[in-house]
Amino acid sequence: MFFYVDESGHTGPNIFDVDQPVLYYGVLSATTNLDLVAEEQVKLARKKLGVERLHAAELGLGGLVKISDYLISVQKRHKPIFDLYRVAKPDHAIICFFDQVFDQGINPAMTWTGYWTPLRYILLVKLASLFDENLAKLAWSSRIETKNQHAESLLIQVCSELINRLKALPDERSRQLLGDSLNWAIRNPDKLQYNCQSKKEVLTVTPNLIGFQSVMHGIASRLKNGKSFASITIDQQSQFNKAQKNLAEFYANARDIPWETGPGLPKMDLSKIPTAPISIRSGKESVGLELVDCYLWLFKRLLEGKDVADELAPIFRAQAYRGRTDEISINAISNRWSKWFDELVEPTSDQIDMAENIRRIDESRRQEAISRQ
């Protein structure tokens, strides 16, 4: 298969830009090389508009309507599939904070079940409810601060303010677990290794790379049905292309490693991750990239509740049961895991006894760790 990847809403580490609150990745895939088989239709579309490249943000809805026949022709002839991935950038700061500060492998005040089972998502959503924009900004500033002393000072401020807000949570156990873990973090900020150590590392924690992880997993899922891999072409974005290539190479090298983080948590299957290197190209050099740019612009517009023209409706209809969407946000996590918990079967008495025994052992360990602070 052939994959073409583009992104929209890129602000790098400036994740609180009110004009770009969501990072989008669009992936257009086909069983044939769109750079070759769709070239004629795209050339005709360019000629009709008098442009050298199809760039949807410049063409606008009116321009895309004028070439809708060509876009629909490509869709009918070659049946490309469009997948869309989103990252709510302000939420990313809170998710990062939870992942780093409450990591039970580092922070002994957190329970094993509170981090290594789906219970982590309950605690994450509850913690997120305590954040406002200013506190999330402070947490993110600490995350991308490369000077350790300053980063730790900011982290302590965030943890202290969250402790002050814990009374807003209705249940005592959540207040206890979150409070104990935050107090441990305040006393041991250096052990958390919360902040980045270089500007290069900052690039690896931005929504751009988090979203690209979803892209790679999405590509792997498209290859699960016995389809052979051909190529991945990514739009040239000089700031993040090297980090994207490094991530793709890391995943390829880890194809045979089992990635299981805890019972009930999603298993990361890298067995179908492509091994061939990704290709970084300018949109002027790839018809596939021109097309994915148009698809991404249109679907982003649709998701944002903006008008889309009837002339382009066949493109949306063609993806109704073929394309996929995925989102990284607090709301998406809450919705996904609320359903999971709702569908749990009632445990047996033996299972309840076993769980209580595990809880006692872990709580004893946790309390002993807290007493040593």
Image (spheres, rainbow, N blue to C red):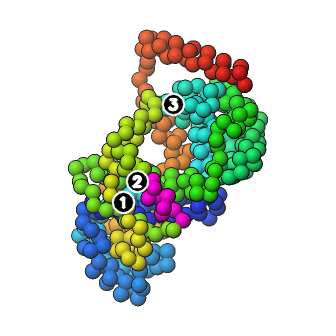
Q: Quadrant of the C terminus?
A: top right
| CA–CA distance in space, label 3 to label 1 | 33 Å
> On the image, numbered disc 2 is attached to which residue?
249
* Element marked by disc 3: helix
Closer-to-camera residue (169/154): 154
For discs 3 and 1, the disc positioned in front in the rendered view = 1
Q: Is residue 6 left or right of residue 18?
A: left
Q: Is residue 165 left or right of residue 76?
A: right
Q: Which residues are magenta?
A: 239-248
Mark 1 neighbour class, 10 Å CA radius: few under 14, some 14 to 19, many 20 or more = some
Q: Tell me whether circle 1 and circle 2 mark residues in contact (CB < 8 Å).
A: yes
As drawn, 271 above or below 204: above
Closer-to-camera residue (30/156): 156
Q: Tell me whether circle 2 and circle 3 mark residues in contact (CB < 8 Å).
A: no
Does the magenta segment cover residue 245? yes
As drawn, 367 above or below 68: above
Mark 3 neighbour class, 10 Å CA radius: few under 14, some 14 to 19, many 20 or more = some
Residue shown at 37%/39% (left/top)? 257
Residue kind at label 2, given as amino acid type:
Glu
Closer-to-camera residue (248/318): 248
In the image, residue 292 lies at what x, y percent? Answer: 39, 68
Residue kind at label 1, given as amino acid type:
Pro
Q: Which mark is residue 116?
A: 3
Residue shown at 40%/49% (left/top)? 251
Q: Which mark is residue 277?
A: 1
Closer-to-camera residue (314/271): 271
In the image, residue 183 lies at what x, y percent? Answer: 72, 31
Q: Main secondary structure of the magenta part?
A: helix
Residue kind at label 3, given as amino acid type:
Trp
* Element marked by disc 1: loop
